[in-house]
Image: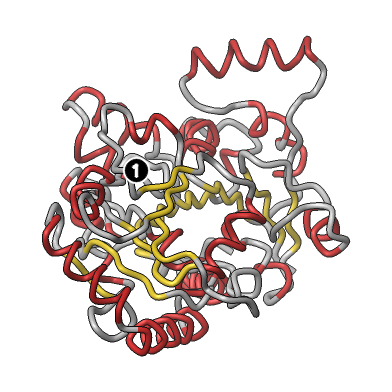
């Protein structure tokens, strides 16, 4: 049996059992429970301090470091019993990578895999000195995954060897995000709060039309934007409500800018898994996951007129929405699901001698 310590911003202790008992609303983050359920791995995590004295100290230390350190330190005992350390997102892997590079026990002798999302984009956009610091920070990682094929070149251009990289096929929990049994009574739904969202273009597209758009995001995502009268804002909603809204949506709209990573991929794939018709910006990264006219509609970056035309067409063409939604669900079931992603990555870890 392969044993893995999972470094995550979440407290993973007993999560799987708590989910099955209905005490937490979703499977493990990023569907990593597939490693246990489908491959028989033993997964462990480390708790964050709840005592105010320790949490205050942690906050000071992590503020100065610029990345989380507590769970890495608390996980040291478990690392000694683990075959591999798996960091869910680059921030959670920063401390472990530093200790691995410096050969500090027990991390110094345990392979480290960093499942990254934003790292390539950070490296591409950072000033030269910061880029060098970031690269040096992750020199201790044995394997760095990324979410689109074109990101590989960003890493290799900085001298990171390709044998330490893998463009993983991103997937979502398709057993959790499923089509609902009620009516699809939300005409257009846009969800998302990461750095890549392009709500300005979307608002320009629907402004002055009879399209009705519901938006779920943080208020700061809409700072300095003129919100049209036909847009309804919901702020941030609980996960269970988000899941239900995907099941009610006729069209889920994911307008983004073209960043190195596939910004918007989680919402787009969770919407596809829910059987919704998906319309997304056709960035280089997103084209790894969607094909125009087959399982989605793709619109050029910043093309408000293109968005207006596509959204009006989809609003008036129920047959097209049903066809694209069914194809999108089938695509997630076949490939873009967490089970496929973690099985693929576990195979790569074996092939490269990490486990």
Q: Is residue 317 left or right of residue 52?
A: left
Q: Secondary structure at mark 1?
A: helix
> Which residue is farthest right?
21
Q: Is residue 25 above or below residue 9?
A: below
Q: How is the image coloured?
A: secondary structure
Q: Is residue 156 visible?
A: yes
Provide residue 140's location: percent of width, then percent of height: 44, 40
Provide residue 141's location: percent of width, then percent of height: 44, 45
Quadrant including the C terminus: bottom right
Q: Is residue 163 visible?
A: no
Q: Is residue 99 above or below residue 288?
A: above
Q: Is residue 186 above or below residue 112?
A: below
Provide residue 14's location: percent of width, then percent of height: 83, 52
Assess disc 1: are there few (<14), some (14-19) or many (≥20) residues with their C-alpha within 10 Å of its C-alpha. many
The residue lying toward the viewer, choosing from 43 and 239, is 239
Quadrant including the N terminus: bottom right
Q: Is residue 341 left or right of residue 120?
A: right
Name the residue that disc number 1 marks: 119
Q: Residue at x 24, y 70 (%)?
A: 312
Q: Residue at x 48, y 64 (%)?
A: 186
Q: Is residue 103 left or right of residue 53?
A: left
Q: Is residue 214 above or below residue 184?
A: above
- Quadrant of residue 173 within the rendered picture: bottom right
The residue lying toward the viewer, choosing from 271 and 137, is 271
- Quadrant of residue 139 within the rendered picture: top left
Q: Residue at x 25, y 51 (%)?
A: 202
């Amino acid at each position: 049996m392969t044993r893995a310590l999972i470094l995550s911003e979440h407290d993973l202790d007993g999560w799987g059992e708590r989910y099955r008992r209905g005490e937490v609303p979703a499977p493990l983050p990023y569907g990593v429970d597939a490693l246990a359920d489908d491959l028989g791995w033993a997964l462990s995590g480390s708790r964050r301090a709840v005592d105010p004295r320790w949490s205050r100290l942690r906050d000071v230390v992590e503020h100065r470091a610029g990345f989380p350190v507590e769970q890495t330190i608390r996980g040291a005992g478990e690392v000694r019993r683990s075959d591999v350390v798996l960091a869910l997102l680059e921030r959670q892997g920063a401390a472990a990578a530093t200790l691995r590079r410096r050969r500090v026990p027990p991390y110094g002798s345990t392979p480290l895999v960093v499942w990254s999302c934003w790292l390539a984009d950070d490296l591409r956009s950072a000033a030269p000195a910061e880029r060098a610091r970031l690269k040096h920070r992750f020199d201790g990682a044995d394997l760095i995954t990324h979410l689109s094929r074109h990101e590989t070149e960003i890493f290799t251009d900085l001298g990171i060897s390709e044998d330490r990289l893998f463009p993983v096929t991103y997937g979502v929990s398709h057993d959790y995000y499923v089509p609902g049994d009620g009516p699809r009574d939300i005409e257009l739904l846009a969800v998302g709060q990461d750095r890549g969202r392009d709500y300005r273009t979307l608002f320009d597209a629907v402004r002055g039309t009879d399209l009705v758009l519901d938006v779920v995001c943080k208020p700061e995502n809409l700072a300095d934007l003129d919100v049209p009268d036909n847009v309804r804002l919901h702020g941030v909603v609980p996960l269970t409500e988000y899941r239900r809204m995907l099941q009610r949506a006729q069209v889920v709209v994911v307008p983004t800018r073209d960043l190195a990573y596939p910004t918007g991929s989680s919402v787009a794939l969770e919407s596809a898994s829910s059987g919704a018709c998906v319309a997304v910006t056709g960035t280089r990264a997103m084209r790894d996951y969607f094909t125009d006219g087959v399982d989605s509609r793709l619109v050029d970056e910043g093309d408000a007129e293109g968005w207006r035309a596509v959204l009006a067409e989809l609003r008036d063409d129920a047959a097209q929405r049903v066809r694209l939604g069914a194809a999108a669900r089938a695509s997630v079931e076949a490939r873009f699901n967490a089970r496929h992603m973690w099985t693929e990555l576990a195979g790569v870890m074996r092939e490269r001698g990490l486990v």
